[in-house]
Image (cartoon, grey):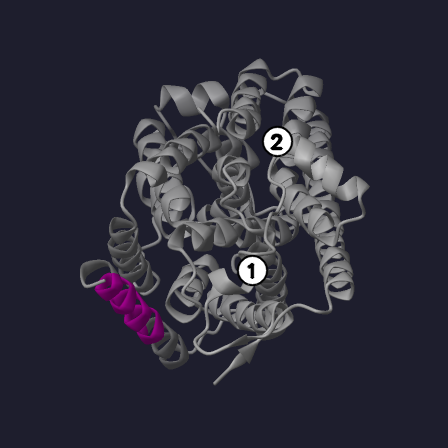
């Protein structure tokens, strides 16, 4: 059985992990919302002359002529380098998608630090599935 | 004769998403459950793009809420991370299935799951006494047991976890449904934990919220690369739902009045019937 001080020390470790995870999530969300807002603002300031659509509403007619949004990493890089608002919006959305991935990565590291091999394997598997999902999508 | 510019589109979508976020947090379901019907029925957006936008909003709300839940110490991090093995695997399978399944099936399936989820929020759940001993070898090996502080009893309550195999199977299905429909599928995750694995009710819902973001990220990765996440739709939806859900949770809290919740649930049932109808009679 574990004694009092050991339990307290273990509790303290768990607490640190929890706070680290909480911080990662918070920063990720705030950063992505800021980027999305900035990107949208930039987009509309550059494309003030967007055509109005008359008649029945159609999302396709509204954006299909202009929507060539980047959804591969290299296209995204080029788009941001050009200072394209749409690229910045995509970057914000991508960061949002990556916050849980980063949260899992923090989990792997903290379980390594705690010397807890079974949970290291668990979190590593989840991390691989998440990273793999970005690369196996085309298969 | 209507005149709509992309700016109007983004602003109106953001406003509706705020409302969806508030509604979602009041009823206790995620905003995604309202977003997909809004995008498909109101804006006539392809259901696959709607699902892509919705899954991003699910991540936003989950990451926002989980940050708070983790600090409250209600979440069982170990059990949550362990079960993510099943939800992420299910989500990736689901993301692949969407390309095979016809969109009509997605509408019908969405209608059915939404209908079930609405009723499930009202089902009376009996709170079992926490387990003191567990013979579950997996739960013992990974030490998934935990404890939480119960403010009603003003003490730390310890509990043991059991039924991990059934829990994993149910979580695989929850991940699959989450990816197929772009929803958090908390209505499926919570029973997998509190009924199958004997986690306390409060711990189950906090842990479910914690897991939803990682589950959604697994399918969002596939959808992102496939070009199914259109930023012009996803951005206002994600920001709007996040804002609405945060506001709903902080300012209004959980609506305790049964009648108010009943009204919301009726709204959701009507939406689910609309989705069903769109799938059956296109």
Q: Residue at x 69, y 52 (%)?
A: A86
Residue A18 seen in the current view: yes
Q: Residue at x 64, y 70 (%)?
A: B7
**B210 sits left or right of B191 in the view:** right
The residue closer to the viewer here, B272 or B104, is B104
Circle 1 marks a residue in which chain? A
Tell me: residue A101, above or below residue A31.
above
Q: Residue at x 61, y 74 (%)?
A: B8
Where residue A67 appears, as percent x and y from the top left, is 59, 53
Q: Residue at x 47, y 38 (%)?
A: B219
Magenta range is B266-278
Tell me which label, 2 or 1, sits earlier in the chain. Answer: 1
Residue A11 seen in the current view: no
Where residue B5 appears, as percent x and y from the top left, is 60, 72
Where residue A97 appears, as percent x and y from the top left, is 60, 42
Q: Main secondary structure of the magenta part?
A: helix
Labels 2, 1: front one: 1
Circle 2 marks a residue in which chain? A
Quadrant of the image occupied by residue A17: top right
Q: Which mark is residue A104?
A: 2
The residue closer to the viewer here, B77 or B133, is B77
Q: Magenta stretch: residue B276 in it?
A: yes
Q: Magenta stretch: residue A26 in it?
A: no
Q: Secondary structure at mark 2?
A: helix
At label 2, counting other C-alpha atoms closer than 10 Å, the crowd grade (few under 14, some 14-19, many 20 or more) is many
Tell me: residue A134, above or below residue B173.
above
Q: Give the spatial CA distance, label 2 vs label 1.
A: 36 Å
Position of the C terminus of chain B, as image quadrant, is: bottom left
Q: Secondary structure at mark 1?
A: helix
Q: Which residue is mark 1?
A: A63
At label 1, counting other C-alpha atoms closer than 10 Å, the crowd grade (few under 14, some 14-19, many 20 or more) is some
């Amino acid at each position: 059985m574990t004694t009092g001080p050991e339990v307290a020390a273990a509790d303290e470790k768990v607490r640190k992990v929890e706070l680290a995870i909480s911080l990662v999530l918070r920063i990720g969300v705030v950063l992505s919302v800021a980027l999305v807002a900035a990107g949208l603002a930039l987009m509309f300031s550059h494309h003030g002359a967007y055509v109005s659509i008359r008649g029945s509403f159609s999302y396709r007619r509204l954006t299909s002529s202009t929507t060539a949004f980047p959804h591969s990493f290299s296209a995204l890089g080029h788009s941001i380098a050009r200072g394209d608002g749409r690229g910045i919006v995509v970057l914000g959305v991508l960061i949002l998608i990556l916050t849980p991935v980063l949260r899992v990565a923090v989990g792997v590291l903290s379980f390594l630090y705690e010397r807890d091999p079974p949970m290291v394997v668990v979190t590593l598997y989840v991390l691989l599935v998440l990273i793999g999902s970005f690369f196996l999508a085309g298969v | 004769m209507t005149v709509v510019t992309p700016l109007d589109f983004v602003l109106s979508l953001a406003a509706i998403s705020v409302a969806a976020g508030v509604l979602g947090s009041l009823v206790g379901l995620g905003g995604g459950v309202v977003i997909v019907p809004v995008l498909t029925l109101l804006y006539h957006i392809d259901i696959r793009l709607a699902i892509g936008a919705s899954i991003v909003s699910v991540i936003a709300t989950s990451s926002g809420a989980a940050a708070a839940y983790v600090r409250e110490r209600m979440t069982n991090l170990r059990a949550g991370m362990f079960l993510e093995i099943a939800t992420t695997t299910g989500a990736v399978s689901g993301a692949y299935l969407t390309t095979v399944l016809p969109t009509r099936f997605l509408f019908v399936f969405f209608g059915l799951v939404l209908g079930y989820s609405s009723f499930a929020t009202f089902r009376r759940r009996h709170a079992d006494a926490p387990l003191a001993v567990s013979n579950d070898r997996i739960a013992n090996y990974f030490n998934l047991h935990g404890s939480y502080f119960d403010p009603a009893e003003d003490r730390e309550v310890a509990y043991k976890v059991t039924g991990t195999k059934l829990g994993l199977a149910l979580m695989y299905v929850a991940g699959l449904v989450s990816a197929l429909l772009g929803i958090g599928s908390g209505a499926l995750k919570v029973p997998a934990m509190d009924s199958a694995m004997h986690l306390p009710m409060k711990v189950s819902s906090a842990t479910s919220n914690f897991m939803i973001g990682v589950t959604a990220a697994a399918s969002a990765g596939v959808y992102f690369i496939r070009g199914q996440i259109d930023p012009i739709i996803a951005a206002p939806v994600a920001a709007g739902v996040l804002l609405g859900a945060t506001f709903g949770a902080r300012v209004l809290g959980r609506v305790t009045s049964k009648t108010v919740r009943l009204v919301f649930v009726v709204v959701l049932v009507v939406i689910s019937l609309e989705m069903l109808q769109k799938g059956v009679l296109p």
